[in-house]
Every structure is written in structure tokens, then in C-alpha cells.
Image (tube, rainbow, N blue to C red):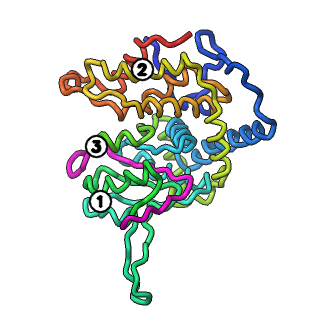
Amino acid sequence: MNHPVELGKGGWPGDGPGDEPGTVQDTPPGAGRPPEETLRQSETARAALAALRTEVAKTVVGQDSVVTGLVIALLCRGHVLLEGVPGTAKTLMIKTLSRALDLDFKRVQFTPDLMPGDVTGSLVYDNRTAEFEFREGPVFTNLLLADEINRTPPKTQASLLEAMEERQVSVEGTARPLPDPFVVCATQNPIEYEGTYPLPEAQLDRFLVKLTVPVPTRDEEISMLQRHASGFDPRDLSEVKPVAGADELAAGRAATRAVHLDPKVAAYVVDLCRATRQSPSLQLGVSPRGATALLATSRAWAWLSGRDYVTPDDVKALARPTLRHRVALRPEAELEGATTDGVLEGILAHVPAPR
């Protein structure tokens, strides 16, 4: 079985296969070389975003692949669902990333008593002017950490739907735009179900990627303990320096949109998504929105790898993080021990990639 490329393993972001045989590398017919200034901005942005991993590593050990996924989401203006057991530095990672990106950051702890207005903001009566004025909620930021999003009822979860999709908040019929960039990073615990409200499929589909945050390896955990023994304080982020910002993200997005997609690779993306709809192990397959998401993340991965074209290996590398939350196992498959990642891996092995 041909296993998909692991996201973020090796160099930045993944030392993709590049010019290996069997990958589609056609240059778009008649395409001209981009202007020198555009190329310079693209290279500067890529170098700045590559430096993020070094800055995040100052506080978080062994989560390179997750940081890669977060950067890809930022390049695609997409949202991220982080899943991992407590104590794997999910919150610390997002806080460090926002500081290294020099972006505005807010955190909301989702609890059963949290109301929609606590997230989006609400109208408040001003006694001095005898008028209602809008008081912005924490959603008006660049990077919003929705901590333990599955601990709040569906009504409050749904308050993020418009913000995530339309990048605006409507209160009393007035639409208020959110800052740009705006990215939601939501966390949830995969093993605790008591007192939780699982996200509905419609909201899951609005997350660009779902990243699993693993427990560090033995060597990484030893390194982490040595840091703490030397006086490391996870609440002190003074050593983390801004290495990129909104300008670099904008240049990176523009360069990502210019990455060439061969028609054969586009057909490969569609074939993978259609195969999930026909899989006997899945009761819910990937929607067309999922196909466009996989296209976007594959282009971002290709650009970060230093290429201006998408290969089938780029698609394979991003298939699991982009699609795993958009499919649902059949109960009988779940009883047999199947997992969504395992089903996706089987589909990647059986759907022929273009050569």
C-alpha cells in the first residue's frame, strides 16, 4: 500500500517529492514568468512563514506538522479544528503562533452557559445618549481561539457560522465586517463525551482542516521536561518574536492562487472525493465544498514547498487533514474498528493517481 506523504515531516513544510517520476508537472500553456517584484514578494513571504516553525518551537515541542497545517489554513483563509487530549499544548500553540505572526488574538472558553452574544457582541443601551450601541465580541479579531467548542450548546456554536463563512456578524439586521485576516482555531477533546455537544456536519464542513495534535514522542517529552527544569514558563512568550504579518500572508495568498493546477490533477481531486461517496464504510462522503478545500490546501502546500504547480503527492499529503472531518463512518464499520483516516488511506491507495 502506498501511504500518503506525512504532513510537515522532514523540512518545511514537507520536502515534497518535487521532480520525481510519475507526477504531473506540466507548465500551463503560454504562461509567462511572473514579474520580478511579484517573485521577490513571494520568496520573502515564503521565508517569513517558514521562520514561524522556529518561533513556535521556542515554546512548543514536536508539533511541526500541526504548525504546517495552521499556516496552510492561514494561506487559504480557512478555519482549523484542533483535536487532541488535554495537555498537548493546543492553546499555547495558537497563542505562540499569533505572537509570531503579529496578529490580534482573542480566546473564548466555550462553556454550557455561554450565549451567542458573548461571542459575536450585542447591543448595549447607553444611558448618556439614550441609544443602543454595538459592543464588539471577541470574534472581532484576527485569530480567534474557540477553546473546547464542543462544550457549548448548538445555539452558541451556530453563532460562529456566519462569521466563519461570510466573515461578518449581523446584529439587528446590520452586517458588521470582521478584520482581515480572520481565522477560527477551535479545539476539542476526542475522548471526553459527557457534557459535550458534537458539532453538526454543516459546521464541521466549514472548517478547512482538522488537525490531530499527538502526544509528543519520548525524546520530545524528555526535551520538554528539560526545558521546564531549566525555568521555562509557558505563560512568558517574550522570547517569541514577530517574523511575519498580514502583508506576508497577503503575498502568500496571492502566490498560492497563482499555483498551476493541471486538469489531470483536478480530476484526481474529484475522483478521490467521489470515491468517499461510494465507499461502503462511509455513510457520508465529501461534499463539493470539500473538493474545493482539498484543491486550496494542495496549492498552498505546493507553494510552501517552492513549486508553482500541484502534484498528486500534494493532494495525497493534504487529503486526510482536509477530508477526515467531512466524512462519517457507518455504525457497522465503526464496530469493526474502522477509522476515517484508515478509510481515506484505503481510498488513496485504490484511486489511480495521474502520471
Few, some or many residues within 10 Å of mark 3 (<14, 14–19, 20+): few
Where is residue 172 shown, x and y percent of the image? 36, 67
Q: Residues within 10 Å of mark 2 (few under 14, many from 20)?
A: many
Secondary structure of the residue carrying tag 1 is loop
In the image, 18 versus 294, the foreground residue is 294
Q: Amino acid at mark 1?
A: Thr
Q: Amino acid at mark 3?
A: Pro
Question: Alpha-carbon neighbours of circle 1 within 10 Å: few (<14), some, or many (≥20)?
Answer: some
Measured Cα–Cα span from mark 3 to mark 1: 17 Å
| Residue wearing tag 3 | 200
Q: Is residue 350 above or below residue 113?
A: above
Residue 272, which numbered label?
2
Q: Is residue 2 left or right of residue 158?
A: right
Q: Position of residue 113 (x, y in %)?
A: 26, 63
Q: CA distance from mark 1 to mark 2?
A: 37 Å
C-alpha gap between disc 2 and disc 3: 23 Å
Q: Nearer the viewer, mark 1 or mark 2?
A: 2
**Which residue is denoted by mark 1 in the rendering?**
111
The verdict on residue 274 being magenta is no
Principal secondary structure, stretch drawn in magenta: loop
Membership of 198 in magenta stretch: yes
